Image: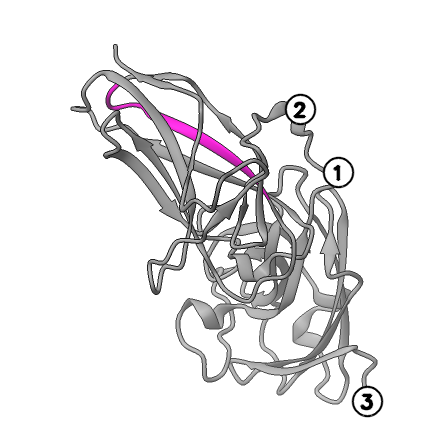
Amino acid sequence: MIGASHATRVRLADKVELLGYDVDRSVAHPGETVNLTLYWRALSPLDRDYRTLAMIAKTEGKGLLAQDDRPHPGGIPTRTWQTDHYVIDRHTIVVPTDTAPMVYDLQAALYDPTTLARLQQDGTSGWAGQQITLGSLRVVPARPPDLRAYRSAGDPVFGGSITLRGYQVSADHVRPGGSLDLILEWQSGRALDHNYTVFTHLIDGQQNQAAGDDSQPVHGQYPTSSWLAGEDVVDRHTLAIPPNLAPGQYHLALGWYDSTTLQRLDANAPGWNGPRSQIDLDLPITVGP
């Protein structure tokens, strides 16, 4: 029996088996280290020396955040591995200081350094089988956001649980064909079991939408069902301004909706007469040369 706290028993190309792993944390701040221990076993004598990768990656994609690459797993060349022994392979991965807070995957892989080809999981084809997803790592901010750097919208609460604590806009003047960046600072009052979509719209004087960006938070990479109660989430949106948009005065409106039903979440704030389906920000946006 091995001492791994997490059993996996995943086979790679019918050559090697990952028996299990240990990890010293499930939550980390940017700049901190994650210590990961992998337990490997050769299923048959190996004819080459494989390298091992321990990785932090974006979920459901190919975005690599950080990795630790070892030429000989556990300090032992794989061609010398014995089938009746397991190898303890320790890795230290540094979370980059500019890492966006969200949930990432912890992954492991073996690859041939000559061809760079990874050993494929038995029974799993394509990219998904070229690494083993071990579990999740949540990266959280090292300190709360400084709300003095944000404009206030009155702390509206959407759906009784998501508060807009502040916002930033890259400019109050934009040219046709340019872009406008909007940063939203959200906080969840409780854990959510549903994934909602944020809409950010540029609205003209007749209340028509002139530009917009709809996505789940953090470019779709941090759905609301992953948020913790009380967590602060910094959510960036870019609105592409049409090149033929008429010059004039516009404003920004935003809110949340259920992408399945298209039902918007009502927002409430102190001093309002009743709920609203969107927030109209009071910063005028001028479109022109």
Q: Are marks 3 and 2 in contact (CB under 8 Å)?
A: no
Say few, some or many: other residues with alpha carbon within 10 Å of mark 1 (under 14 / 14 to 19 / 20 or more): few
What residue span does the magenta drawing correspond to? 176-186
Does the magenta segment cover residue 185? yes
Answer left or right for 35 relative to 100.
Answer: right
Quadrant in the rendering for residue 178: top left
Give above or below for 49 relative to 252.
below
Q: Residue furthest front?
A: 273
Which mark is drawn over residue 1? 3
Callout 3 secondary element? loop
Estimate the spatial distance between the alpha carbons at disc 3 and disc 1, rounded to whole Å.
Answer: 41 Å
**Which one is earlier in the sequence, the residue at label 3 or at label 2?**
3
Give above or below for 112 relative to 85.
above
**Which one is earlier in the sequence, the residue at label 2 or at label 1?**
1
Answer left or right for 36 relative to 196.
Answer: right
Kind of residue sitting beneath label 1: Arg
Kind of residue sitting beneath label 2: Arg
Which mark is drawn over residue 148? 2
Answer left or right for 3 relative to 9.
Answer: right
**Which one is earlier in the sequence, the residue at label 3 or at label 1?**
3
Kind of residue sitting beneath label 3: Met
> Considering depth in this image, is 46 or 208 the residue closer to the camera?
208
Residue under pointer 1: 143
Give above or below for 252 relative to 13.
above
Estimate the spatial distance between the alpha carbons at disc 3 and disc 2, rounded to whole Å.
Answer: 55 Å
